[in-house]
Structure formats: structure tokens, C-alpha cells
Image: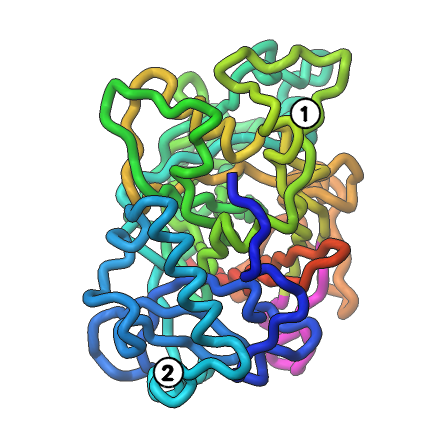
Amino acid sequence: MTTLNETHDPELKSWVTSANKAGCDFPIQNLPFGRFRRTGIEDGWRIGVAIGDQVLDLRAAGLVDNDDMNTVMAASPEARQALRRELSDGLREGSTQRPAWTRALVPQNECEYSVPCRIGDYTDFYTSVHHATTVGKQFRPDNPLLPNYKWVPIGYHGRASSIGVSGGTFKRPRGQTRAPDAQAPSLGPSKRLDYELELGWFVACGNEQGEPIEIGNAEAHLFGVTLFNDWSARDIQGWEYQPLGPFLSKNFASTVSPWMVTMEALAPFRAAFERPADDPQPLPYLDSDANRARGAFSISLEVLVQTAKMREAGEAPVRLSATNTSRAAYWTPAQLVAHHTVNGCNLQAGDLLGSGTLSGPEPSEAGSLMELTGSGKSPVTLPNGEVRSFLEDGDTLILRGWCEADGAIRIGLGECSGTVAAS
Ligand code: MN
């Protein structure tokens, strides 16, 4: 597990002065990785690190010799920590790197982004017991939580090809649905399009097939975290999900934020993993003293919406819900890695592990419209009078995340936005 070192020192300031402003997502204590290029320049994607309102081009700064992010991610934990120290040293006030690295900076508002790495495989978990319970109630009022939930970190294999980066638009999916009163299903645009507030944990170095990753070593196999929106068509999902789980209701589009906030940057924002005494305790392969002491993370999350009408009227997005991972997640990232590989499944650098919808215990902390509106029965009224049961064409959905702790500088995950287009 990563520990605090001089790169987390709250007194550190950068010669990139925008990084020193209070509330900035990307102070020198953060240093998240992404892939970028200058807008409109049809060049290959380059590896960048966000600092203040700038991006440091790692190859131009002489820190990498090619632009393959997955290679950087697959390096040993020691090499990744050494790169973080080099970045921290070179970007801090008084560094002799300043003249050379100034030429390697690009303003963020002159950049466009790709998904932050090549995502080979994508798995989505189901780590919020509150989400699982609320959703389960809609299908099984008397027995909302299935008996395996508190023993197994539930997940399914998703699809990587349709994962896009923040700022994009996707078409409302069409699919087969069956209305409750209908004799037969029909094909058409989804009428119950939803979002899911999630985090995406990216795999660093992988494991050999047949060689499980033990929980004590699990975090060394994680590179960092992004915001993740697992767009979901609830009407397609309701008709197709039995017996093999989600399929076309989920794989038409997913969205990630551009920046991977590293496990090292998250070190000041760890939390205890607590399991209520009445609940089953994790099996030994999912348990360790270190995981109990500080295997969880405290990441604040919020969801905002801006409808087409709001955009035309120049109105800012409004908040739909907010929560914190420490209130929402039943399993830690290390447990997800240990469980995913316990059967010998091999993970690879760049694989994405979705957290599942991160809903907290209170209704205002729900991470999807299905939960916020009771499956559409209690629509949300927006400040301009518009009403939403599910998403409509032209809606932009925005996820934001940040970390705060006593004695640490606030860091941000940035933003993950996406807009629904007509089918
Ligand atoms: Mn999901």
C-alpha cells in the first residue's frame, strides 16, 4: 500500500502558479496521468500529467521515451513512485527543470483528450450495498439482497470498445423491451435511459494466468482511478438480464474522465474498511489487517445535470445527488483485485474495474435516476420546472469527484460529462 512521503507535503507549491490556487483539482500533490493532444492537430496521443490549468507533455519533458501509456502503467510500483518523485521535484517552486519543462506545458483549454490508456478488458462490480438493496427491492420487495452479496464482490464482464472520454455524445440505444402490460416485446429507442455514478480503477501491472493476486499485494497492481459513468437502459435491462446479467442495456456507451489519479496521490485519503459486526466477515483471501486499517478511500462524488433547455438559457448544471465512497462501497479496490484473480484470471495493464453504482445510505445519495425517482414513479423536478424520470435527448450528465482530509491539500478527479443524442 502506498504511504505518505514528501510528494504529499501540504506546503509544496509549484512554479505553475495556477496549481497553487485553493480548490484547484490538480495541485502538485495530485499529478494525474492522461492522454492528450493539441485540439485540431491530428497528431498521435501523448502522455500528459495535469498540473494547475496546464498539461505537462512527458515526452517533451524527457520523462518517457515513447507515448505508450500502458507501458508506463505496467512498470513496477518502484518505477511508478520514482516517476512521481521526479515530477514532483521538477514542478516544485525553485526547480532547475523550470526552463526546460515550461516548453513542455500545454494549456488544458487548448487540449483534447482520449480515454487515458488502451482499455483491453472492462469488468463492472456492484460494490454499493445500498444500490444493490434499493434495486433489489424493486424486483424482490421481501428479499432485496441476494444471499451471495455479502460474501462475493459481485461483478460481470463489460465491453471496452464503447468506452469513451468525457465531453462526448452518444446515441440513445435502441433495443428490445417489453412493457409490463404488453403480450410481446418490441424494438425501439430506450425510454428509461439512466446513468450510473461510478469510479473506474485502472490495472497497472497484470498477473500471469493461473497466478492469483493476493490481497496484500493487490494495490501494487492498481495504477489509479477515474470517474466512470456506466450509462444504462433500464427497460432493455429489465427484459434481458435474466439469466446471464446485463448485456445490450449496458454496452452501448460508457464514459470516463480524462485523468487517472494515481494510487500514490490517493494516499492521504485512505479510510478504514469496516464491516458491520452482524454481517459476514470477509473470507481470508479478501481480508488483511492492512485492508481493514486503510484499504478504503474517502472520495467525495456528485452528479449534475444540464438539460438542452438549461444550456440554451445559459443556466449552469444543477446537482442531482452527492455521496462519498466511504459511505457507499462495501468492498475495497484491493478486494476487487484479489477476487477477480482468485480463480487464476489474468489482469492486464490498462484493464478497467468499475466500482458499480456508488449510492450512499440516504435517498439523496443515490447514484442513478432509477433510485432517485423510484424507477420513474417520483420524478425529479429541476429548478427551471423541467421534470425527469429518466434522461431525455440533449441532457448532459456530469460526474465530479474530489478528496479532502485534514493536513492534506485537496485533490480533484476532474469531470466526466456526456450528452445524450437522439436515437
Ligand atoms: Mn454499473
Horizontal and vertical percent for residue 328? 68, 37
Q: Is residue 313 magenta?
A: yes
> Quarter of the image holding residue 371?
top right
| Residue that mark 2 sits on | 101
Disc 2 residue crowd, few under 14, some 14–19, many 20+, Cα 10 Å: some
**Residue 184 visible at all:** no
Percent from the top left, x then y, of residue 303?
A: 65, 56
Which residue is found at the position 69% from the left and 59% from the top?
A: 408
Please report whichever mark, 1 or 2, sits nearer to the chain's N-terminal start.
Answer: 2
Residue holding disc 1 = 133
Segment colored magenta: 306-320
Q: Residue at x 66, y 30 (%)?
A: 293
Say which of 196 and 70 sits in front. 70
The answer to which of 334 and 400 lies nearer the viewer is 334
Along the line of sight, the residue nearer the viewer: 65 or 309 = 65
The residue depicted at 26 percent of the width and 66 percent of the height is: 64
Q: Amino acid at mark 2?
A: Trp
Colouring rule applied to residues: rainbow
Tell whether 95 sits left or right of 121: right
Q: Residue 131 or 53: which is nearer the viewer?
A: 53
Q: Is residue 171 visible?
A: yes
Mark 2 within 8 Å of ligand 1, using the beta carbon: no
Q: Is 53 rendered above or below residue 50?
A: below
Percent x, y of residue 83 = 37, 60
Q: Is residue 299 magenta?
A: no
Q: Which amino acid, by three-letter code, is at mark 1?
A: Thr
Residue 292 rendering spot, x and y as whole percentages: 64, 26
Q: Quadrant of residue 366?
A: top right
